[in-house]
Image: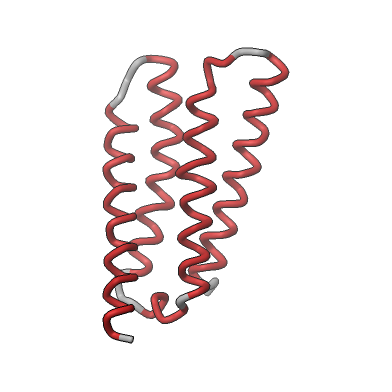
Amino acid sequence: MIEIDHAYIAVALLWAVVGMLLGLYIGITADNKLLSIHTAILLPGFVTLAIFGMIYRLWPALKKAPLARIQFWLTVLSSAGIFVGSYLFVTSGSILLVAIASIAMIVGATLMAWLFIAQARDA
């Protein structure tokens, strides 16, 4: 099974490529309508997931925590939900999915903080 830090970085890099391609499209078409989606891909998708991957890499004991896999899937799926939800918001005004995914991402980030603090306390 792939290590959680490697999985985070792999997913983050995929989001980076998708975000860059969307940015290229925005630049070529000069249509800023999708700019918020571009931002939603790169910040929660690339930056946040890459940071989480680096945290797991720098503090390998965190990977052994029972909640590490839950935290991983929660944030990875949330980043996808934010991307799709942002698209739905821009195209139809629907905010439900992006709101739910954003709350889930906040829960995932809080869980990461809790895992980190708990591990630092135990060390």
Name the spot of residue 46 as percent of width and height, x first.
Answer: 54, 47
Q: Image quarter for residue 25?
A: top right
Q: Name the residue located 66 percent from the left edge and 13 percent from the top edge.
A: 30
Which part of the image, by quadrant, shows the C terminus? bottom left
The answer to which quarter of the image holds residue 85 is: top left
Task: Determine the residue positioned at 39% across, 39% down.
Answer: 81
Identify which residue, 80 or 31, lies in the foreground: 31
Measured as percent of width and height from the top left, residue 97 is found at 32, 32
Q: Examine the rendered structure and indicate whether residue 64 appears above or below residue 78.
A: below
Q: Determine whether 48 is above or below 98 in the image.
A: below
Residue, x 55% and y 54% (percent of image)?
A: 11
Who is closer to the viewer here, 85 or 45? 45
- Height in image: 111 above or below 75? below
Q: Is residue 13 left or right of residue 39?
A: right
Q: How many labels, in total? A: 0
Residue farthest bottom in this picture? 123
Residue 112, position in %: x, y? 34, 63
- With respect to residue 101, does 25 lie above or below? above
